[in-house]
């Protein structure tokens, strides 16, 4: 869902908005792959969440699916600048 269908359905609109706004940084939820895909055209990216890291097998599966999305659009993922946790004591 997050790395496949959601990217397919919303990427074009997200890209158009990102290009119109020209953000320096795109901050996305840890499960989101639309924002990082839009950021791949030139913005830096960061991730936010409210808990610890996602299970590695879950992340690996999402990243595998997302890699195909990037290839289909001739994009390369930009490195993540950081992880922002608004509740670091959780």
Image (spheres, rainbow, N blue to C red):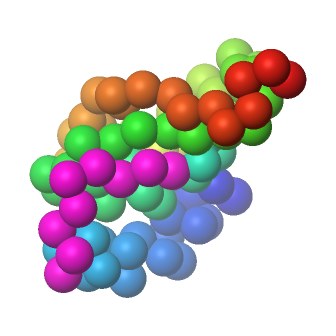
In the rendered view, tell whether residue 41 sits above or below residue 83: below
Left or right: 41 in relation to 45 = left
Q: Where does residue 45 sit, x and y in percent of width and height?
A: 34, 42
Left or right: 5 in relation to 58 = left
In the rendered view, tell whether residue 10 sits above or below residue 37: below
Residue shown at the point (60%, 48%) measured from the top left = 29
Q: Where does residue 89 sit, x and y in percent of width and height?
A: 80, 20
Left or right: 85 in relation to 72 = right
Q: Which quarter shows the N terminus?
A: bottom right
Residue shown at the point (64%, 32%) measured from the top left = 85
Q: Can residue 12 be seen here?
A: no
- Tell how many labels: 0
Q: Which quarter shows the C terminus?
A: top right
Residue shown at the point (29%, 38%) measured from the top left = 77
Q: Where does residue 32 sit, x and y in percent of width and height?
A: 57, 51
State the image quarter where residue 53 is shown. Answer: top right
Viewer-proximal residue among 36 and 3: 36
Left or right: 29 in relation to 90 = left
Q: Where does residue 62 sit, x and y in percent of width and height?
A: 60, 38
In the rendered view, tell whether residue 40 sits above or below residue 21: above
> Which segment did they paint magenta?
20-28
Q: Can residue 76 be seen here?
A: yes
Viewer-proximal residue among 82 and 58: 82
Q: Is 8 within the magenta?
A: no
Single out the residue that lies furthest toward the right: 90
Residue shown at the point (36%, 30%) measured from the top left = 80
Q: Is 27 within the magenta?
A: yes
Viewer-proximal residue among 71 and 41: 41
């Amino acid at each position: 869902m997050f790395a496949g269908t959601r990217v397919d359905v919303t990427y074009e609109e997200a890209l158009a908005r990102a290009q119109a706004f020209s953000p320096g940084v795109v901050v996305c939820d840890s499960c989101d792959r639309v924002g990082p895909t839009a950021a791949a055209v030139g913005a830096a990216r960061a991730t936010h969440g409210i808990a610890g890291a996602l299970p590695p097998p879950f992340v690996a599966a999402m990243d595998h699916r997302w890699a195909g999305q990037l290839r289909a659009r001739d994009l390369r993922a930009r490195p993540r600048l950081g992880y922002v946790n608004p509740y670091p004591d959780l």
